[in-house]
Amino acid sequence: MKEIVQMIVVLSVICTICGVALSGFRNMTADRIENQVLMNVQGPKVKLVLEGAENDLIADRKNLSVNDEQLLLFIGKKQGKDWAIAYETVGQGFGGDLKVMVGYDIEQNNLTGVQIISHKETPGIGSRVTENQFTKRFKGLHIDIEIDPNQCPGDIDAISGATYSSKGVCEALRKSIALYPEIRKQALAN
Amino acid sequence: MGLSKEFTKGLWNELPPFRLVLGLCPVLAVTKSAETGLGMGLAVIFVLTCSNMLVSSLRNVIPRKVRIASFIVIIATFVVVVELTAQAFFYPIYEKLGIFIPLIVVNCIILGRAEAFASRNGVIPSALDGLGIGTGFTLSLTVLGGIREILGNGTIFGAEIMWSSFRPFTFMVEAPGAFLSLGLLLGIMNAFSKSN
């Protein structure tokens, strides 16, 4: 009996101490890790989406709340003036969530670029949606284009063999465009 | 047997991947380049030394029947510390090592040293044992990674060193190259120690 109690007590104490220490350490590093992930994962993509921006895109990011959802907004500036915004939306690809970053020119209301932030598509087939060959087709589109829920906009061909993945990108784009008026308003307000 | 022997044994007599032939999973997986090998090795040195010290200082408190569970909790804690640190300060290396950092928890070298050495010896010998074995592991990984990187990519630590007409054997940086180079090194070392 005494032995069992001793085992329980020792193991519980060790686990508790380790747990407390780790959660403390996690809190200490959380900010830095968030920053690192932004710089290394989203940073390069944001730069492509808002190509031509002259400010530090990561430092000038903002947290917005749209329809009760938290959203990270990147703002691109040219000659000190707000020029374009970019944010992420999610579509359903073939293998799972497709996170897509879309950038908008807020003056002309057209797309400055589209990049895939993360995906779970089949390597070599669905993953081709991340290639410039595909993403560049969206550049310059006006936000008034109709996007049929099951299709890509008229002049955008899906990648053959990767229909679901292409649709997933367009679904994310459709959601993104639907949010655009609200986000633009908020971005201009502050 | 002096204290220094606890350190130096890890460098040859009990060199982890080649003499103990333990912990081969990361050895094969992360030695695509000298840089990733070194990064992995440093992470292991830290975890091994800290867990050895803690295990040996708690060796009289932990009941024998739950020792493995306790060791695993202690090791896992240090591994998470390494993982968060790597994520916060060395993100590119963290991305390259990926799943193999959390997998240090189940690396048999670390559990093996906790069980075979730290739980039976004092704090200072255990710390030296951890440092020695960890250094041996790091050197092995760096050398193996270096060989694979030079032959497979023509570079070392990212710097071009081969002549310009050199055509890299790409397969050296892929999985078969890992088995091949580990096997050859193991064979060479065995031949060497036999002839002594």
Image (cartoon, coloured by chain):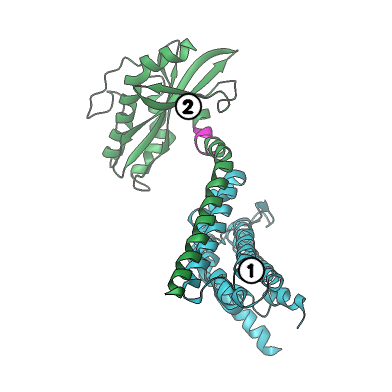
Name the residue tied to disc 1.
B57
| The chain in cyan | B
- What chain does badge 2 belong to? A
**Picture coordinates of residue B128, whole percent (x, y):** 71, 70
Magenta span has B187?
Answer: no
Q: Amino acid at mark 1?
A: Ser
Which of the two residues, B92 or A124, is positioned nearer the viewer here?
B92
Residue at 58% across, 76% down: B184
Which residues, given as a range, are shown in magenta?
A40-45
**Tell me, what hue is chain A?**
green
- What chain does badge 1 belong to? B
Residue at 57% across, 15% down: A78
Q: Is residue B77 above or below residue A121?
A: below
Q: In the shown orientation, is residue B155 left or right of residue A68?
A: right
Q: Amino acid at mark 2?
A: Val
Name the residue tied to disc 2.
A49
In this view, the residue farthest toward the front is A2
Residue at 37% across, 18% down: A180
| Callout 2: SS | helix
**Dot 1: within a 10 Å radius of its alpha carbon, few (fewer than 14), some, or many (20 or more) residues?**
some
**Picture coordinates of residue A10, whole percent (x, y):** 51, 66
**Front of the two marks 1 and 2:** 1
Residue at 52% across, 61% down: A14
How far apart marks 1 and 2 lie (CA) works out to 54 Å
